[in-house]
Image: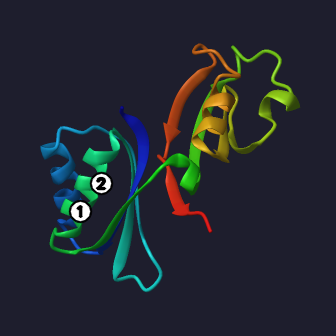
Amino acid sequence: MTALKILSVLVENKPGTLFRVTHMIRLMRLNIEGLTCGVTNGGDRSRITMTVNGDDATLDFLAKQLSKVIDVYEAQTYSPEEVTARELALIKLNLSSVSHLDDRRLQGARIVETSDRSITIEVIGSPAEIDRFIHRFDSTQILELARTGTTAVPKG
């Protein structure tokens, strides 16, 4: 049975490493639902966090194979329940179609930019919280939407 999993890969921070990691996933015919990558403390390593759909055996095999790739220090798979996960969304709303923009609809968001025609808000939360927030608005109200993808650390 396939399920959404979090794949966390600690790598050397140098050109080509992200390509090698994502190429391995492509070879296994898996789709990356979300991806974040950033430098860790020290600056010489980066953490790649990916959300991938797959069965446990395939994703465990992938983590073992990734651990063998040059410049990969470790690769781990987690279920969503095993991690603390956050995502950021920037949502540009059309002010002319949002006639009654009240505080309840914006609860949990921060206004980052306004103009005569639009307002851009920032929402940070779990992927499910971001989904619920987006569903407060219909497609005519959302001019643009950008999501970072999930970043996560194991619980405990």
What x and y, as percent, mark residue 39? 41, 72
Q: Is residue 130 above or below residue 72?
A: above
In screen coordinates, is 78 left or right of 103? left
| Secondary-structure class at tag 2 | helix
The residue depicted at 28 percent of the width and 59 percent of the height is 63
Mark 1 Cα within 10 Å, few/some/many (few <14, many 20+)? some
* Residue 142 or residue 74, whichever sits in front: 74
Asked if labels 2 and 1 touch by Cβ distance under 8 angstroms, the answer is: yes
The residue depicted at 36 percent of the width and 32 percent of the height is 1
**For residue 78, what is the image quadrant?**
bottom left
Amino acid type at circle 2 is Asp
| Secondary-structure class at tag 1 | helix
* Residue, disc 2: 60
Q: Is residue 48 above or below residue 117?
A: below
What x and y, as percent, mark residue 90? 58, 41
**For residue 10, what is the image quadrant?**
bottom left
* Residue, disc 1: 64
What x and y, as percent, mark residue 132? 67, 29
In screen coordinates, is 53 left or right of 156? left
What x and y, as percent, mark residue 32? 32, 42
